[in-house]
Amino acid sequence: MSETILLSSPDALIQVAQRGAVRVLTLNRPAALNSFTQALHVELRVALDAAAAEPAVRAVLVTGAGRAFSAGQDLNDPAMAPGVDGKPDIGAVIEKNYRPLALRLQSMPVPVVCAVNGVAAGAGANFALCCDIVLAARSASFIQAFSKIGLIPDCGGTWLLPRLAGRARAMALALTGDKLSAADAERFGLIWQVVDDAELQTQALALADKLAAMPSAALVATRRAFDAAQSMSLADALSLEARVQGELGRAHDFAEGVAAFQQKRPAVFKDR
Ligand code: T3D
């Protein structure tokens, strides 16, 4: 595997690096707990778009610099300042930044792994939960901080939380704004796995590497089918499965996977 190639400067708000087929994106405002400013949103969108457009990228890993993953919206950002009517237009901030972010993650052409290295609060928590597979350091935590400042969960939180944790737990988490440990987040089904702090980056990279070597098109079709099936009858979901399986069955990666199995060799997948 090739060495990490640094693709952006260490003082960028999103550090971008390439490790083999994995694009590593690191939120990099540690002094403000990687909270989201307008500028960080722009850099993150550019970085995700670039990863999506680059054929050599077969998985993305998202993490944070310093002791936090992300504290959500930067409450000191000028975007929070009063608008023409003297009040902040938070709806506009959501439409401009968080909606495109959640939809970008949902439509990435490769799997996205998230390594939650510390506290993930507000939109920072839901940004993590938008990723395909979430690992968290044992010392990390998740806080639906919105209720404490008079808001509702955003960045996909209203859609994700009840689906992942069930309505009862989603309601308690969102209404209280209490801190949830990484272990409880795993127990509630919000995330995939808790790992020891010292192991987080290694294990997250290993997982991203593993996914990068797998048939990307099928992995992404799985995400799409799971999301689409949320609002379907079983009959419609079965029809969707037949249609998608029909498409994948005609693709390179299926033929390669079966050939590799029959020839007892590792498969070399290339569809994306
Ligand atoms: O426009 C919109 O608002 C729409 C979008 C909304 C989406 C949202 O995300 S709303 C929710 C916003 N986030 C929060 O309300 C979380 C606020 N932060 C906290 O509750 C705590 O900081 C944490 C629980 C995350 C961590 O606590 P702790 O004790 O480990 O750290 P700290 O001392 O509170 O914070 C360290 C520094 O980060 C501190 O700065 P300082 O004093 O050292 O200069 C603190 O002000 C700064 N910081 C933390 N969170 C934010 C922040 N600065 C700006 N915005 C933040 N969200």
Image (cartoon, helix red, strand yellow):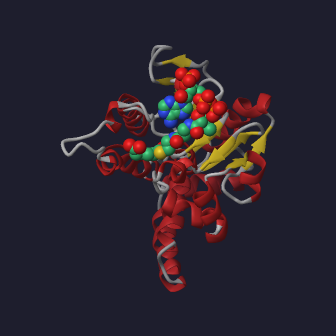
Residue depicted at x 54% and y 60%: 160
Residue 17 vs 57, above or below: the answer is: above
Q: Position of residue 257 (x, y in %)?
A: 62, 54
Considering every residue shown, the one lying at the far left of the view is 84
User: Considering depth in this image, is 26 or 98 the residue closer to the camera?
Assistant: 98
User: Considering depth in this image, is 13 or 82 the residue closer to the camera?
Assistant: 82
Quadrant of the rendering where the N terminus is positioned: top right
Considering every residue shown, the one lying at the far right of the view is 196
User: Considering depth in this image, is 123 or 239 the residue closer to the camera?
Assistant: 123
Q: Quadrant of residue 269?
A: top right
How many badges with numbers are in the image?
0
Residue 137 vs 31, above or below: the answer is: below
Q: Is residue 116 left or right of residue 112?
A: right
Q: Quadrant of ligand 1?
A: top right
Residue depicted at x 69% and y 42%: 141
- Residue 159 visible to an observer of this rendering: yes
Q: Position of residue 225 (x, y in %)?
A: 50, 66
Q: Quadrant of residue 119?
A: top right
- Residue 212 visible to an observer of this rendering: no
Residue 237 vs 60, above or below: the answer is: below
Q: Position of residue 11 (x, y in %)?
A: 47, 14
Q: Is residue 193 left or right of residue 5?
A: right
User: Considering depth in this image, is 63 or 167 the residue closer to the camera?
Assistant: 167
Q: Is residue 48 left or right of residue 190?
A: left
Q: Position of residue 149 (x, y in %)?
A: 49, 48
